Image (cartoon, rainbow, N blue to C red):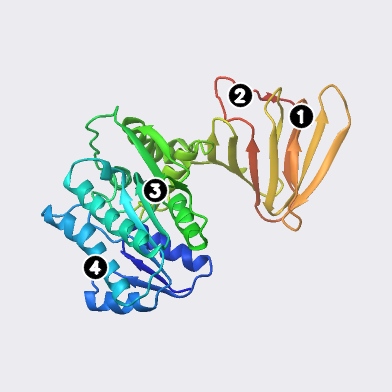
Amino acid sequence: MQILVTGANGFVGKNLVTQLKNAGYTDITTFTKENTLEELTKLTATCDFVYHLAGVNRPKDTQEFFEGNGTLTEQLIACLEANQNIVPVMLSSSTQATLGNDYGKSKCQGEQVVREYGNKHQVPVMIYRFPNIFGKWSQPNYNSAIATFCHQVARDLPIQVNDPAVVMQLVYIDDVVAELIRCLTGDELRQGEFCYVPTVHTQKLGWIAETIQSFKETRETRETPFMGDALTKKLYSTYLSFLPENAFSYELKMNVDQRGSFTEFLKTVDYGQVSINISKPGIVKGNHWHHTKNEKFLVVYGKGVVRFRKIETDDVIEYHVSDEKLEVVDIPVGYTHHIENLGDTDMVTVMWANEPFDPENPDTYYLEV
């Protein structure tokens, strides 16, 4: 199958072409604003399917709306018909097609052209009226408010929210691309004369802005956003894609003493805390127990022993650990415990606790093993 993608250098186009290749489609031709109408004629002579994503969002002159969204669509269909190559066409339209603005009118123009083409030749056409699309490779101040917010926040620049109560309908680029690829096998989702992306997120603009701003703060608090919420998860991925290339990394506060160091890595309200413990040779750390707090230890470098003793008993239990065999040791409540470095080098242990450390209620009681 030879697939033609117009607007291949745009936000949706880049993501679609990349994922088509990942899915094993190798015969992909592209049409961008650098190409000529003569080249479009050649490209439409041999293609088996057309993704028509090319369009104009923010022109200098409103007439460009009709040229980029209406006239170009007419030229595409004319090329297919001139080549007598009647193939399925997918069209990227917008929910604004229901509005009376010039952008919406130009999108309606393109829809009508594709609809008539499908009816005339009895060939499948797929018209999507997309709401706001967000995700990686989008352009700030062009594709969406989310792209602008992410770009600004990642660079410590202010953002402007005119009306935080405005409710937005959002679709994530990966969900869009997954649906578009279904078109190739005739599995697209339809409702009436339009196709649609099944996962749509509805949220107020103020919440979106506050959530994106909170992402930057997580580097200081070490708290991860709540990944149980699908929209938050997708917004966070989008935000990270806008980080400046010299700002991918950030330092952690290392609590260092003569025994080694202890560094908090990640915290979550619901899923606990991950820390990195480094112990020098011969050092013992711990000798305490918990009522409710439980932990998991994983030695990833060096060798040592984790010892336990159930409080009010004398029996000591030992678990030897090393980087030669990665093994997680659970730390049950009611057992005093410690970990000792038995090697000649530093021992590195990844430690998980089921709750972030609370200095007001540490639930930690000193007792030697």
Mark 2 residue type: Pro
Q: Residue at x 70, y 39 (%)?
A: 296
Which label is found at residue 336? 1
Q: Are marks 1 and 2 in contact (CB under 8 Å)?
A: no
Q: Residue at x 32, y 72 (%)?
A: 80
To which residue does mark 2 refer?
A: 362
Neighbor class of circle 3 (other Cα within 10 Å; few <14, some 14-19, many 20+) is few
Q: Nearer the viewer, mark 2 or mark 3?
A: 3
Which label is found at residue 75? 4
Where residue 103 appears, as percent x and y from the top left, is 20, 48
Q: CA distance from mark 1 to mark 2?
A: 15 Å
In terms of depth relative to the viewer, which is nearer, 3 or 261?
3
Q: CA distance from mark 2 to mark 3?
A: 60 Å
Mark 1 residue type: Thr
Q: Are marks 1 and 4 in contact (CB under 8 Å)?
A: no
Q: CA distance from mark 3 to mark 4?
A: 22 Å
In terms of depth relative to the viewer, which is nearer, 186 or 156?
186
Q: Nearer the viewer, mark 4 or mark 2?
A: 4
Q: Are marks 1 and 3 in contact (CB under 8 Å)?
A: no
Mark 3 residue type: Glu
Q: Earlier in the sequence, mark 3 or mark 4?
A: 4
Q: Are marks 4 and 2 in contact (CB under 8 Å)?
A: no
Q: CA distance from mark 1 to mark 3?
A: 67 Å
Secondary element type, mark 1: strand
Secondary element type, mark 4: helix
Q: CA distance from mark 4 to mark 2?
A: 69 Å
Where residue 35 appears, as percent x and y from the top left, is 25, 74
Mark 4 residue type: Gln
To which residue does mark 3 refer?
A: 193
Q: How many marks?
A: 4
Q: Earlier in the sequence, mark 4 or mark 2?
A: 4
